């Protein structure tokens, strides 16, 4: 994938007006393990496909707990995801220490998107090569957010990222309306 002198740095624009380093990071998300998220009026659920490179290697975690009310599913570079998860945990702990309440998921995801976007402006950093599905629950109910390396965030009822995510989203579009909001009773 030789692209001339335009893919050497994240702050170099190609003649077509593209940031190739950001496109490479987006491609790493598309090639990552599949991750699916759903939300209803009562619950938010994330599922991820764990795959190992060989029989001898261990599976890597694809779903990470951030706080009691926030979890993350990842697709892309696991090392970048662990870095972002550590930062998110630190933000949640700082908020809980200072204000005495859990951090609102939407605020954390907005700050996360700013962190993603900041790497596209600085020449010494590369973009994070990971996409995240963030499931949160607060006083307004459950939420499902998706972030991407460019710094965009989206809120969904159901979404999929990673390998074969388009077929996953197509399936969710067909089936989601048929799912009903049953409360789980134990």
Image (cartoon, helix red, strand yellow):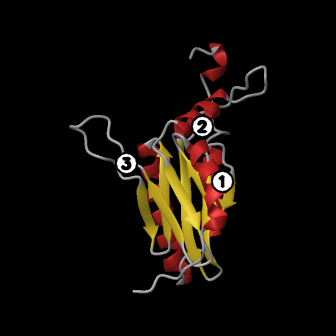
| Percent of width and height locating residue 108 | 60, 65
Residue drawn at (32%, 35%) of the image: 53
Report which residue position mark 1 lands on: 114
Can I make out residue 164 in this image? yes
Residue drawn at (54%, 59%) of the image: 37
Label 2: how many Cα within 10 Å (few below 14, some 14–19, many 20+): many
Label number found at residue 50: 3
| Percent of width and height locating residue 46 | 49, 61
| Label 1 – label 3 distance at C-alpha | 28 Å
Q: Nearer the viewer, mark 1 or mark 3?
A: 3
Q: Earlier in the sequence, mark 3 or mark 2?
A: 2
Can I make out residue 124 in this image? no
Which residue is most to the right?
A: 16
Q: Quadrant of the C terminus?
A: bottom left
Element assignment for label 2: helix
Element assignment for label 3: loop
Report which residue position mark 2 lands on: 26
Q: Nearer the viewer, residue 22 or 29?
A: 29
Which residue is most to the bottom?
A: 186
Label 1: how many Cα within 10 Å (few below 14, some 14–19, many 20+): some
Label number found at residue 136: none
């Amino acid at each position: 994938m030789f692209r001339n002198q335009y893919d050497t740095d994240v702050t170099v624009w190609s003649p077509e007006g593209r940031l190739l380093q950001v496109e490479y990071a987006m491609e790493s998300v598309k090639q990552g393990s599949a991750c699916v998220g759903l939300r209803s009026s009562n619950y938010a659920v994330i599922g991820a496909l764990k795959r190992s490179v060989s029989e001898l290697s261990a599976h890597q975690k694809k779903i990470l707990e951030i706080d009691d009310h926030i979890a993350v599913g990842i697709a892309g570079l696991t090392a970048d995801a662990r870095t972002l998860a550590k930062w998110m945990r630190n933000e949640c702990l700082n908020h809980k220490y200072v204000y005495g309440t859990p951090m609102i998921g939407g605020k954390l995801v907005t700050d996360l998107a700013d962190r993603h976007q900041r790497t596209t402006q600085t020449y010494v950093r590369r973009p994070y090569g990971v996409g995240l599905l963030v499931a949160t629950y607060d006083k307004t109910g459950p939420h499902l957010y998706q972030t991407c390396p460019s710094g965009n965030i989206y809120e969904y009822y159901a979404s999929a990222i990673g390998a074969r995510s388009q077929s996953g989203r197509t399936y969710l579009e067909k089936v989601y309306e048929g799912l009903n909001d049953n409360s789980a009773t134990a």
